[in-house]
Image (spheres, rainbow, N blue to C red):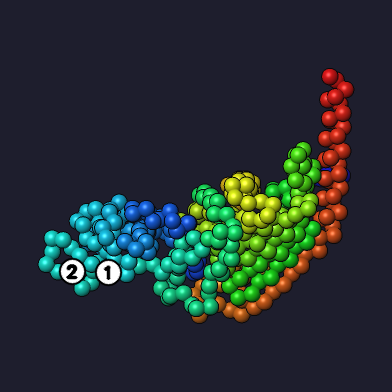
Amino acid sequence: MSDQLSDTDEVRQIDSGAAPTRFARGWHCLGLSESFRDGKPHSVQAFGTKLVLFADSTGKIAVLDAYCRHMGGDLSQGTVKGDEIACPFHDWRWGANGRCQKIPYARRVPPLARTRSWPILDQDGMLFVWNDPEGNPPPEDVIVPRIEGALSDEWTDWVWFETTVDTNCREVIDNVVDMAHFFYVHYSFPTFFKNVFEGHVATQYMRGEAREDLRPNTHGQPKMLGSNSTAAYYGPSFMVDDLVYNYVGYDVESVLINCHYPVSADKFVLQYGIIVKKSPTITGPAADELAAKFGTFIAKGFEQDVEIWKNKTRIDNPLLCNEDGPVYQLRRWYEQFYVDAAEVTPEMTERFEFELDTTRPVESWKKEVAENLARKADEADAAVAVR
């Protein structure tokens, strides 16, 4: 019998679709606030344009369109003078409100000398900018949650990473419902997985065990038992993950940030950071060192994702099995950020809950882990025998 498909067999075709031409409505984190308070202008490519960020004499940060409305000079190549950003071309001075405040060689400033000023939020050590293709201000009920441990002496400082990825940012969002990739890509072992979407928030609840076959315990180091994660996207691009690592005898509390902003339809900047709560067991430099180690560990996880994204294709019609998560429901939730506010439908925002049945995956993965451990033991015995 031939394994070849006949001409009458239906072959599943991939619908790659097209990335949206507009950028998501919502708050987007541009990085740690302090990195923009050095007295210099900063250039950021985002939302298909160039922005300039600068801090005034009080340390308050402003975000403007980077190109001067006079003759097109690049303000990010200019100089911060007092509370304004001065264009390097003709020294026109632009304030945080987008108005030209001064033209040194002119008697007066033209009444129409205005540029775009972007709404910002400086919170918990991070700087956010609001994007809305319709030009509306952020609604009061669309918030970025406060992070309890941020800027607290009881927690470490942010450990922060950044990388640029050449694909559409929807690839990041799909991970919210993708349980199986944690085992195969990140070498984690999920045992519980649930999603809840409601309003502008999409949440992932996950519990997992440590994979002894790929992350064996180091002699003399605390043994990790597993982790407990509650990760929620607030809007299209900012995720807060309350992440607890379970060790023999104690837990380590941390907060992981996973955020991004689009550069273009097929490029985004991915940023991620972590803080760790200090404890009687872990204090001072030891807590900072632990946060740095976790940060490096998490960075490797994102690097694994990036490698997948670099080589996969966009797919609008994924073929799913029963043990896959609610990919289509998540994308319906995500769509609300890419349509006008008046076109947001109840189906995009109404509450949706889905708990994945992990019985079959856990059974399969336990067997795989056991086989891997047995093989490594045999290889170790063989290595000893030939010495």
Q: Place residue 99 in its image quadrant.
A: bottom left
- N-terminal label among 2 and 1: 1
Image coordinates for residue 176, horizontal then vertical, percent: 66, 61
Q: Place residue 18 in its image quadrant.
A: bottom right
Q: Residues within 10 Å of mark 2 (few under 14, many from 20)?
A: some
Q: Residue furthest left?
A: 107
When the figure is inspected, residue 136 is found, relative to residue 155, above or below; the finding is below
Asked whether 228 or 21 is in front, the reply is 228
Q: Amino acid at mark 1?
A: Arg
When the figure is inspected, residue 56 is found, relative to residue 308, above or below; the finding is below
Q: Residue furthest top?
A: 387
Asked whether 60 or 69 is in front, the reply is 60
Give the labeled residue for mark 1: 99
Decide if residue 27 is on the left or right side of residue 373.
Answer: left
When the figure is inspected, residue 348 is found, relative to residue 176, above or below; the finding is below
What label sits on residue 258 in the rendered view? none
Q: Residue at x 84, y 19 (%)?
A: 387
The secondary structure type at the circle numbered 1 is loop
Q: Residue at x 81, y 63 (%)?
A: 357
Decide if residue 268 is on the left or right side of residue 303.
Answer: left
Decide if residue 134 is on the left or right side of residue 238.
Answer: left
Decide if residue 64 is on the left or right side of residue 161.
Answer: left
The secondary structure type at the circle numbered 2 is loop
Asked whether 60 or 379 is in front, the reply is 60
Q: Residue at x 28, y 53 (%)?
A: 78
What label sits on residue 109 in the rendered view? 2
Q: Alpha-carbon distance for marks 2 and 1?
A: 9 Å
Residue 174 appears in the picture as rendered: no
Q: Quadrant of the N terminus?
A: top right
Q: Amino acid at mark 2?
A: Val
Image coordinates for residue 278, horizontal then vertical, percent: 63, 55
- Tell me, yes or no, whether the two marked residues, 2 and 1, touch with CB atoms within 8 Å: yes
